[in-house]
Every structure is written in structure tokens, then in C-alpha cells.
Image (tube, rainbow, N blue to C red):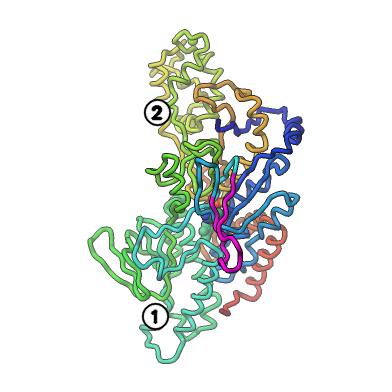
Amino acid sequence: SGGLVAYSESQTDVSNTSVEINAKDCKKRRVVVLGTGWAGISFLKDVDVSAYDVQVISPRNYFAFTPLLPSVTCGTVEARSIVEPVRNIIKKRNGEIKFFEAECIKIDAANKKILCRSTFDNNLVGNEEFSLEYDYLVIAVGAQVNTFNTPGVVENCHFLKEVEDAQKIRRSVIDCFEKAVLPGLSEEEQRINLHFVIVGGGPTGVEFAAELHDYVQEDLVNLYPTVKDLVKITVIQSGDHILNMFDERISSFAEQKFSRDGIEVQTGCRVISVSDKEITMKLKSKEEICSIPHGLVVWSTGVETRPVVKDFMGQIGQGSRRVLATDEWLRVKGCADVYALGDCATINQRKVMEDIAAIFKAADKDNSGALTVKEFQDVVDDILERYPQVEHYLKSKHLSDVTDLLKDPEGNARDEVDIGGFKLALSHVDSQMKNLPATAQQVAAQQGAYLSKCFNHRQQCEDNPEGPRRFKGSGRHQFHPFRYKHLGQFAPLGGEQTAAELPGDWVSIGHSTQWLWYSVYASKQVSWRTRVLVVSDWTRRFIFGRDSSR
Ligand code: FAD
Ligand code: MG
Ligand code: MG
Ligand code: MG
Ligand code: MG
């Protein structure tokens, strides 16, 4: 069986589980974790190493604090300040976790094995490839940059995904300035060298544009005074607005600020190819194609599934999907004992309507074929927990109580409803299903923490497969599913101004939000070491400006 791993807060009898697990110490089950990003690291921080034999595979032997990567592109913070060695992190777990610097190149789901390739040269290490067996596999490999197969992108664009990418951008920006001031260039050639193009108007592209603008205005114009008026920054966005995943107040504030700053925003444009000199695009409204010369292009249009995950999806019957699907307990659909979290996966939420007959049956305890308000009330908590959309629906309809759903069209309470009436009463709740943000550090980190809890309470879950709640409506889902807590999201816009979308439709924009941003990101650092480094980088920048050496 898939093994029940979900965890319930209503289970209080936790005290003796660790003893039981220790008794079985001799045959610890093997957990293999793929990836040391937000999801993987947050899982590793809490998973019970006395109960599991944990091995971690990642081509990078460090965790990177991605929200500060755009700051690395301009030297506002140093690359070293935002990374924490994996070995530092696992040292804190009594050294019981093993780490291998390698890439997983194949998941063999049928034989519960993975194949890995070390990132080193074959001449330096004996076996370049090795395989590992697992009892449980945790896939947290994130996603890769999506080029949409646009010709020339891989060869001629910078990405902003990894620490190395940010470092390369930093050097290339300076190169553009040094090239522009070489003797013998025409003004036109100087302009081309100093034309910075960002493809993609999402949070990363916009933040980079803002950061670059500040860097140019605060530091570089003083160092390269002869070309200071020739710099241009262009953001190309295929949609109608930049930051369109944010509240529209934030999106329009960003557009206005960029327009004041002289950052050009080209919306409704699709890039069709990139060469070393030019970027060619198509205006969506007209069938017109135009090319503009550039000095540097940063490609930041979103992510897609990694090949190793695609291949795995093919093996387990998810081949036609774009993203690996899990249930709300982060269990991969169609493959027992494999879990997936973070950017590489998406949770497929159940619809109430899919389960409506089972819910009715479970609620109708006396099997009378009719549901009384009392019977309904008994399962309400389970329904709310299992189907978060019900709560969103009630809110949207300004109803205070789920039982209000059972009222007749005139608003009068009904004594009971039959299955037809029940279906009708709940027929619209699924319209309020909310998807989690597709890529978000908070989702990945919360999922990692949740999954480690599930693992740590596995014994107990297996001993009580029915769980404390007996809501059988949806099969074996007795424990509380993953619930995302949105704590808000920032969009730094440059000039010491940041926009923030906070829970409950709150939007805050400006200098004070920038200070909130500083304090939140300082506090979120994974170690005191990186916290001190980041804060001192900020301080250094305030006092001395950014370092512009190559
Ligand atoms: P990742 O953090 O990408 O980690 C994936 C891990 O898997 C890495 O360690 C990688 O090396 C490893 N890996 C890759 N392939 C393999 C393989 N084949 N085998 C083994 N290991 C593998 N989100 C926000 O919410 N707020 C922000 O401000 C924000 N800013 C961002 C800025 C930038 C520049 C970027 C790139 C992202 C930003 N994000 C932000 C998104 C956020 O970083 C991701 O949502 C988050 O990193 C997802 O975590 P993850 O663990 O799923 O993947
Ligand atoms: Mg990860
Ligand atoms: Mg990461
Ligand atoms: Mg996801
Ligand atoms: Mg009944």
C-alpha cells in the first residue's frame, strides 16, 4: 500500500511513537530526497533521522536563498552571502543524513531505484554513475527555465535561475559598459551596447529591471559619465500588464513607476528569436514583426518540468500532463511511496462534486436516504477540512454557516434533503477552488515542513489507518491534507520602494514596505551566518555603493 503518511493535529498520543520507531532501528526505512532547494531543505530540517535512513542527492552542494538572487546580479548582495552549504545544514542533524553531489538522471519507479550521475569529470572520480534504492522517494527538484523552444535563446540570453546565472549577469553588465566606452565607437554602437532587454514581466524580470535601473542610476552613471544618457532598459511582456499575477493596484503602480524611471515596458509582444545582436518579436495586435538591437538579454518567462520528472511521469501514466500531480498529501498520483513537492509538482485538489455521493452516504448515518441538518452538521468539519473551496464559497456568498447551504431558495430551513437536493445545494462550491501559486518559495518550504511531519508520524498513521476522524467519503483520506498559509508576497520595484500583497486583500506599497522587505528577508535567512552576511552587504551598499569591478 501507499502507506498513510498524512498527519493529524487531532492525534495527540504522539509520546510513544518515537520509542516504537527506535525499537525498529535495525531496519530503518530508506528515504531518498532529490534536491536541496526550498522544498528539499525544509523537509530535511525536520525529518526524524532516528526513524529513517536519509540520503540526499543534488547537483549543488548548497541551498540558495532565491528571493535575493536579483540583488546578486548588481552586487547589492554578494553570491556567497545567500548560499548555505548543505553540509552545514546536515551537520546540525547529527550527521545522520548522507549527501551526494550528483544529478538524478532516471527514476525507476517499478524497481524503486534511482540512477544518478556525479557532477564531476569522469577522469577524476571512479564511477561517474551510481544507483540508489529507496523505500520512499521525495522529489523536490524544482523546475527549469522555459524557453518555449524559441530559437537562439539558449545561446544568446542570460537566465536568472541559479547563483551562477546571477554572477554571470553581474559581469556582463559591467562588460557592456566597458565595451561602450572603448575608443572609436559611434553613438549608435554605444547605445546598442547599453540596451538591456528583459523578456518576461513577472516578479523576477521586474525585480531585475528595477535593480538594474538603480545600479545604473546610483553607481554606474558616476563611473561612466560619458555614456550615462545612452543607457536603456526594456521589459518585454507577452500579456497586457507586467506583474499580472499580483493585485492590479500593484501592477499599475509598477507600470507607472517604470514609466517615470524611463524603463520601457512593451506589452503584447512575443519574442520569436534572439541572435547575438538582435531580438526579434511579433506584436500580438498586428501581424507585424520587428527586431531591436541589444547589448544583453535576460530571459525570465517562466518554468517547465525537468526531463527526469517528465520521464517519470511517462512511467506512471501522467505522460499527458504538463506538471507532476500529487494529491493533497503530496503523494504522487499513480505511484506508491513517492512524494513530490515544490516547483516540480502541483496538487490536484478533489472536487466536492466528484465525491458527492460518497459524502452523502457518509453523512446519512441512518441510511434513510435523506439528510437531516443534524446529520449534516456532524460531517461539516470534515468537509471543510477536506474541501477548502467550501469555505471560500461560503465567504464569497457571505454565509456564516455551512448549514445555510441546505436552505431552500426562499431562505427557509429544510428539515432534510435527499441526494438530489444535496447535489443542488453544493453544486456551485467547486467554482471557488483556488490554485496555489505555481512557483513560490513559501509553498515549497511549507510543503517540506508538512511532509516531514507526515513522515515523523507515519508509524502512528499506519497503526490507526482509520484515523481519529471517520470521514470515509473520500476513501482513505482520514488525516488533514496540506493547507497553504499565504503570508503575503513582495515585489521590489527599485528606488527603495517595494509593493506587498498581504493576506486578506491588503496591498501596501512604498518605502515603509521596503523596510518590511529588509526585515522579513533578514529574518528568513537559513542561518545566522548568512543573516549577518546579507545585512552587512546591505549596510556596505548604503555607505559605499555597489562594487562595480568585474
Ligand atoms: P528549487 O529551490 O529550485 O530547488 C531544486 C533543487 O533540486 C536544487 O537544489 C537543484 O540543484 C536540485 N536539482 C535539480 N535537478 C536535479 C536532479 N536531476 N537531481 C537532483 N537534484 C536536482 N519565490 C517567492 O515566493 N518569492 C520570491 O521573491 C522569489 N524570488 C525568486 C527569484 C528568483 C531569481 C528565482 C529563480 C525564483 C524565485 N522564487 C521566489 C521562486 C522560488 O525560488 C521557488 O518557488 C522555490 O525555489 C521552489 O523550491 P523547490 O525546492 O521546489 O525548487
Ligand atoms: Mg528542493
Ligand atoms: Mg532554492
Ligand atoms: Mg508546486
Ligand atoms: Mg438520514
Residue under the image location 41 percent in, 13 percent down: 418
In the figure, residue 267 lies in which quadrant? bottom left
Q: Position of residue 214 (x, y in %)?
A: 52, 70
Observer-nearest of 365 and 420? 365
Amino acid, disc 2: His
Location of residue 53 by image quarter: top right
The residue indicated by pointer 2 is 428
| Magenta segment | 115-133
Vertical position of residue 361 compared to residue 331: above or below: above
Locate residue 59, reporting x and y percent. 57, 59
Residue where numbered disc 1 is placed = 191
- Residue lying furthest front in this view? 126
- Quadrant where the image shows the C terminus: bottom right
| Distance Cα–Cα, label 1 vs label 2 | 56 Å
Measuring from the top left, give residue 501's x and y in whole percent.
52, 50
Q: Dot 2: what SS?
A: loop
Residue at 47%, 49% (x, y): give it: 309
Indicate the position of residue 62 as horizontal and vertical percent values: 63, 59
Q: Nearer the viewer, residue 257 or 491?
A: 491
